[in-house]
Image (cartoon, rainbow, N blue to C red):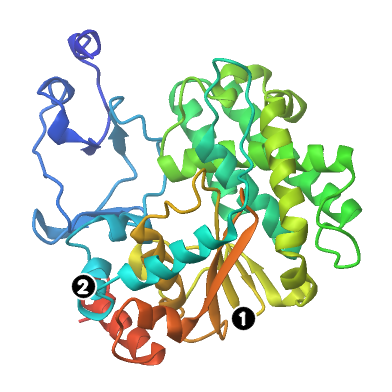
Amino acid sequence: MKLWAMTFPQLGADFVLLDEAQDTNHLPTEPAAVRPYPGDAYLHVRAGTWQSAHVCPAGPRRWDRCAWLPCGQSAPGERNHGLSLTSQIDASDSPFTRFTALHLPRPRAAMDTYRAAARAAQRPVSLPTPPPGVRPAWGTLGAAIDHRLRYAFTCQQVIDGAVREGVVSAAAWCASMRRPDVADTILATGRDLESELRFLLKQERPDDRGQPILLAAAAEDRLARLCVAMVWFEEVYRCGVLYPGSAIVRLAAELTLPALLAQVPDYMADDLTAQVRLAQDALGELRAGTEAEECYSGPVFAGSRAVGGADADLIAGRLLLDFKALKDPVRLPPAAAYQLAGYALLDFEDLYRLERVGFYLTRSGQLITWGLGEFTGLLDAQVPVPELRAELSGCLASEDPDAEA
């Protein structure tokens, strides 16, 4: 960083966005005369503008010409939704946390019923078996099995929007680093990834209720690798980072879809296949009792935008399902209960007509569900679901800087 600052680089930007500035020093701001606008809980970067009622009273500022300093490593042009639902749950002063403190104040009963069900099952847990000295990529595997199991219920959405955003963000980052050749290969690989998924899903029909969830060995392995490749791009979008050690960066200008799929370790493909095998029995009845047309992959809700982004895993019929790839099924954090309730309550218009909510534990093959009203009651709600939705909608609207006066 010091060597970079000593070059006195010309940033060519009207504003400089510096993430985690509280943990850095004066070096990042030396290259330019900077008037600082410190971030706070009211700072939002969304839809190409940034604003904060506390530190920028002039209102929204365009960031078409903003520079992203290397200490953050966020992809230029990356769309930042501010606090997502999960981030709001983690933040003690967020609008959603204030809502839960008033209307869903005690998660203990919900967590107790969950843990009792998880313990009662006493199921063995399927774990990955990487080569010696290799740490499993837990996050990547968890996101990949999410995608794979969605396809068992519906293939209407070939590729998640977050994956497309990740492709664009990764390409934008490489272009900003004066590597247009790499940016072009990333965009081409993203197109090939979607085309290959479309072809495979049409050929294998994994959502066909007339065949098992687990595909033939070669097809299952291929789909598993495609799911991992999707997650590698999705991680760029969700984290705002293109890590130097990622398969995308390692391949650089040599990136192609076959080369990317070859980077997926065998243990990852095998682990996903083992989890799909567990789902055959655990999710078989639920799958058989629904049609693909009444299942929704990665559903968003009327209130998703108000919390900065909220997309659930799956809706199957009237059941909202959250996939959890837990090493220890009993150790589910209370935040997961609020996340599940949050998704259901953000359906302000009752578009999905949800009746039940639940978790599916992908590594132990266990489905745990509750009635929606029962679940909010276990979180100590004192009013029915429609009133909770109205209260949440009003709470979020009062905090939204874009809301009309």
Q: Nearer the viewer, residue 281 or 401?
A: 281
**Image x and y of residue 115, in percent:** 44, 62
Q: Residue at x 73, y 34 (%)?
A: 270
Location of residue 213 with respect to 178 vertically, above or below? below
Q: Is residue 293 above or below residue 256?
A: below
Q: Is residue 245 left or right of residue 186?
A: left
Q: Which residue is mark 1?
A: 318
Tell me the CA gap for discs 2 and 1.
27 Å
Label 2: how many Cα within 10 Å (few below 14, some 14–19, many 20+)? few
Instruction: Determine whether 367 is above or below 391 in the image.
Output: above
**Foreground residue among 388 and 2:** 388
Which residue, given by chain and number where applicable, does mark 2 sit on?
101
**Is 77 placed left or right of 107 in the picture?**
right
Q: Which residue appears at 60% of the width and 45% of the height?
A: 125
Res 354 → quadrant: bottom right
Q: Secondary structure at mark 1?
A: loop
Where in the figure is residue 161, as x and y percent of width and height? 58, 54
> Which image quadrant: the N terminus?
top left
